[in-house]
Every structure is written in structure tokens, then in C-alpha cells.
Image (cartoon, grey):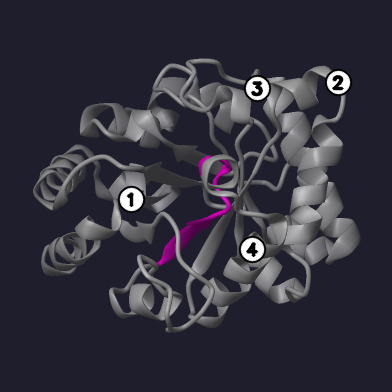
Amino acid sequence: MADNGGARKPLMSGNWKMNHNHLQAIQVVQKLATRLNDKTYDVVDVSVHPPFTGLRSLQTLIEADKLPIALGAQNCHWEESGAYTGEVSPQMLAKLNVVYVVVGHSERRQHLGETDEMVNKKVKAVLAAGMTPIMCVGESMEERQEGDAQDKVQGQVRAGLEGVSDEQVGGMVIAYEPIWAIGTGETATADDAQEMCEAIRVLVADTSSDDAAEALRIQYGGSVKPDNTAELMDQPDIDGALVGGGSLDPDDFAKIVQFQASSD
């Protein structure tokens, strides 16, 4: 689709996965905050997604120091409460002032059996709790090699957004993460990433509305590093990055967040 003229502010999200205890989480965010400045926050939104054990500590730090960094979670259940041992509800996250919740990450789909139906339930639950879902989609290497990548990703998008209003869709984030590029050091080319992100936006325009498609932010994820961020972010349908390993070190993540500086 056409360039949006900068209307969609990029969202750079650090997904720490199962890394950093709550003390390490505090240190990382403190260091990250010293490396970013007001000019950065004017042009980029930033979120950090620690393990559940770090959420309360980071909430306290972010609010006490008035840091313009959004708190994010990596997952949630779709029920408000109940006999779901080991799970955390959206309402519990909302009480910690969590802003963004990752749902449907490929690691959870692959290793923990999450289905498109479960992801859709989580999307709706996160929205109902007043937070913003970052809904992950992506294809395997086999699906890409067989020419099924776009069908797979569009199918995930269609299923994940089932029953979600146009207005809600427009306020969401979809993260395109090719499974074969996550944690492998492999990265989709900027052109390949743009092609898929454009296909996602076109589908949303067809299934929701043009307004929802234009407002929706689409992140790219998959071995995002300081040296490839600017080229990826230069694509018209890529509106940020969901960063895994590259977000664990505050110096590296700061460089990724400040990708405009490296592209000047």
C-alpha cells in the first residue's frame, strides 16, 4: 500500500522471553533510559516485555522515574479468573498498568500448542481489559519454500481478528515474525518483509476497513539487529519491530530504537 506519510508512529518492542530476573530487569531499563532522549520518544514508541516476575518491579521504576517507556507482557490467558494454574489474566496485567500484550508468538504456537482460536480469544480479552494486543503471525521455512507463506500468514491474521471491530483492529499491533528468522541470525530481506507486511495490510483493508488498515501498526520481528533496523524501518508498511535477543542488552536495543540516527 502507499506510504502513510509518517502517520503511524513506529513501535519498538523488546521481548525478553525467559531472560532477566526482576533485579536485572530494573538495571536494563535504567540503562536503556539513559541512552534514549526526549527526541527519540517524539518519533518512536518504546515498550519492554519482561517475564511476569519483572512486571511489578518495572511498573514501579517506570512510574517513579516517569520514564516514557511502555510496560508490556509476553502472554496472558483469556479468562478473567478461575482454575487455570500457572496462568495470568488480562485484568491482572491491566492492574500493573501494562500497555501492550504479546499474543500468539510462534514459540507458544509451536511449543505450547496455541491455536488460532486461542489467539483470537486472547486478542479479544486483551482489548476488553483496555490494553493493546501485539498479535504475532509468521510462516515456517517449509511453508515459505513451498510458496504457502502468504496464505499461512493471511490465514493467521484472518482467524486472529475474527469478531474484532474495525476500530479495535485499527488500534492494534500485528507483528510479522517469519519463524525461520527467530533466534537464527537469519533475517528476511527488507523487500520480503515489506511484501508480507503489505499483504497483511491489504487483507485487513478487505476484511475490516481501509481506515483500520491505515491505522494498524505492523511490526517486523526476526533477528532484528542495530545494523539491519534502518533498512527494515524504511519500508512503507513496516511500523516498528518486535525484538528478541537484540533487546536484552540496553546498548544494542537503544541503537535499534534510534534507527533514524543510523540512517541519516
Asked which secondary structure carries label 2, the reply is loop
Q: Residue at x 24, y 41 (%)?
A: 36
Mark nearer the viewer, 2 or 3: 2
Q: Earlier in the sequence, mark 1 or mark 3?
A: 1
Measure the alpha-carbon separation of dots 4 and 3: 30 Å
Looking at the rendered image, the disc whose residue lies closer to the viewer, 1 or 2, is 2
Q: Is residue 2 visible?
A: no
Q: Secondary structure at mark 4?
A: helix
Secondary structure of the residue carrying tag 1 is strand
Q: Which residue type does callout 3 highlight?
A: Ala
Residue named by callout 4: 118
Residue at point 46% right, 61% down?
101
N-terminal of the two: label 1 or label 2?
Answer: 1
Above-or-below relation of 228 to 193: above
The answer to whether one can see residue 203 in this image is: yes
Residue identified by numbered label 3: 190
Q: Nearer the viewer, residue 75 or 66?
A: 75
Determine which quarter of the picture holds residue 118: bottom right
Which comes before the other along the chain, label 4 or label 2? 4
Residue to which mark 1 is pinned: 48
Q: Where residue 229 sits in the image (x, y, percent)? A: 48, 26
